[in-house]
Image: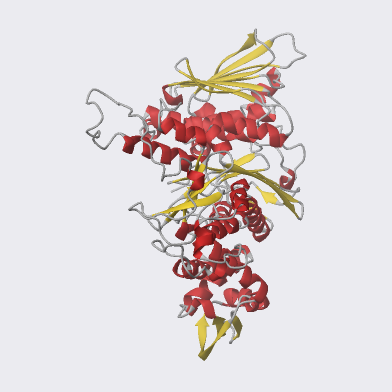
Amino acid sequence: MKIRRLPDHLVNQIAAGEVVERPANAIKELLENSLDAGARRITIDLEEGGRRLIRITDDGCGMTPEEIRLALERHATSKLPTDDLSLIRSLGFRGEALPSIASVSCIEISSRPAEAETGWRVKVDYGQVTADAPVGMNPGTRIAVSDLFARLPARLKFLKSERSELTACLDIVRRLAMAHPHVGFTVTHGGRTLFQSAAQSGDLFAAGAGRLTDVLGVEFTDNAIPVDVSRDGLRLSGFASLPTYNRGVGDHQFLFVDGRPVRDRLLLGAIRGAYQDVLAHDRFPVVVLFLETPEGFVDVNVHPTKAEVRFADAALVRGLIVGGLRAGLQAAGQRSSTTVAAAALGALGRSATAPAAPSSVPSGGFGYQSRPSAPSMSPRLSDWSVAYNTGGNAVPPAQSRLADFAPHAPAASSAAHEEHPAPEAEDATRFPMGAARAQINNTYIVAETADGGMVLVDQHAAHERLVYERMKAALAEGGIKRQLLLLPEVVELDQIAADALETRAGDLDSLGLVIERFGPAAILVREVPALLGKADVPGLVRDLADEIVHLGEAFSLKEKLHEVCATMACHGSVRAGRRLSVTEMNALLREMEATPNSGQCNHGRPTWLKLHQADIEKLFGRR
């Protein structure tokens, strides 16, 4: 079979298969062109999920007739003033988008620079120019793509339903809108406005917060922590959700590198590592992170869609993300998601209607009886200074206090003193977590705050987090104890992996793993961290070798040590069902206020929730 040169129209269709798989890809390429052109307002009009029509109008710099014609040729671009691919700072640069789209659709480009008196229109029908003439229009560019893949049945049959394609289009718009908050976006579908966000003012951080409210909703911004850290020329900024505000899938993790939306496994893995000990493995945080890099640090020329990137120092990027997110989570302290309290209120509202009405209440509706006189009962929750069990009977305070809380708890001379605290004990309500007033089912602590609110604490989940944080601090300060292997274990590897481990032997030694080279392609393990117990040494060493080869750092060993600490903390903390004295409960609350990440346990469950006075009043019909 002889070699032949493919015709231009077939070459363009093959190239289009790499760049344009569905309407969302076409929208991404066209929006990137608008943003590179300096647009401040962009309107996207869609029909039939983008299959029938995609029309994008912007107020950017516009193009002359010659530039429009040149833009429709393959590998013609204004984004590379030099031939150095390491200096790319624009979103587009390949010069493939417009000719690729024009080869699989009918496309009409109308554009006018601000200094021109009139605009110019070029229409291309599946690669053939059918119109090339002046047109009246405002400064800017308007591109209409119609009947995408209509003449390519093999491509058309792989498109999904109209709703699925529309969802993908909106996802692209929202991602670019988050990265460019100073640009206004409007999306319509069939004449109906689906998304609209005005251009935000202020610096990039403030403008980004306003845009995220439009895109992700006020619930996210209410439950997000700011992230802004720098290291070695890199800057990471954005917002990350509290651990108790999470999703069941990872499609709400938005990552941007130099303003470009990316889907990078390294970055996603770093986010998972940062939330490892505060979130369950089957839950995902909501994050919006922007990474800014120096020139030459990122290679974006690794995939036609430009959704994947490569970093000059992957370990530095991962360390920056993990460290930045963990610092933000620690700064949040005992803060918990507002959705936890909202869910509790919803559950209380449903359960309030479940029981049958008491016999003293008329059957025609809700009736209110006169308040009975009960001189033996205190009218205020703040007067309850002892724990109560489920039967409503007062429980004598525990004779022995938790040793962990002893340094923080006030002295108590007798049980009578516990049941009748000194007047100054009432001042405990001024603390963020309030003052302990009761214990429910020997599991949940009820506290009152100064604003009249009520805090409910899961004593086991809260103490589990406190113990875990202490163990991590002890590991960092006192080092990691090692277990000498009776018979050193030889792990067979390839030479590249063995070389990588040998170069990091000192770092692994500080983590309790003592290794040495054993021949050209093997590693001898002499000691392992004692915390790991009966560990799979060969599997651990191979995982570490893979990480060091690809990332330049051994992360899994640290994570395994933390997993062991989390398990030990779970089994060593105060169990549900243990009766606590008021002193012990208050000591637990005070330590929660001073401990990072105390808003959730090691498995990601919330440790406490707060009901404000207004919320409680609504439950009883007072509001």
Query: Horizontal and vertical percent for residue 385?
Result: 49, 52
Q: Residue 493: tell me if it is visible.
A: no
- Tally the numbered discs: 0
Side of 612 where 332 appears, left or right: right
Query: Horizontal and vertical percent for residue 544?
Result: 56, 71
Classify 30 as above or below 471: above
Side of 260 where 366 appears, left or right: left
Side of 233 where 529 appears, left or right: left
Q: Residue 60: tell me if it is visible.
A: yes
Classify 145 as above or below 358: above
Classify 289 as above or below 545: above
Q: Which residue is more in the foreground, 560 or 491?
A: 560
What residue sits 41% from the left and 22% below the top?
Answer: 48
What residue sits 47% from the left and 55% below the top?
Answer: 386
Q: Which residue is more in the foreground, 335 or 165?
A: 335
State the image quarter where residue 255 is shown. Answer: top right
Query: Horizontal and vertical percent for residue 427?
Result: 62, 49
Classify 158 as above or below 321: above
**Outermost residue, bottom direction?**
486
Side of 386 where 427 appears, left or right: right
Q: Which residue is more in the foreground, 253 or 114?
A: 253
Q: Which colour scheme is used?
A: secondary structure
Query: Horizontal and vertical percent for residue 73?
Result: 62, 29
Q: Which residue is more in the foreground, 511 or 354?
A: 354
What residue sits 42% from the left and 37% below the top?
Answer: 345
State the image quarter where residue 516 is shown. Answer: bottom right
What residue sits 77% from the left and 52% below the top?
Answer: 233
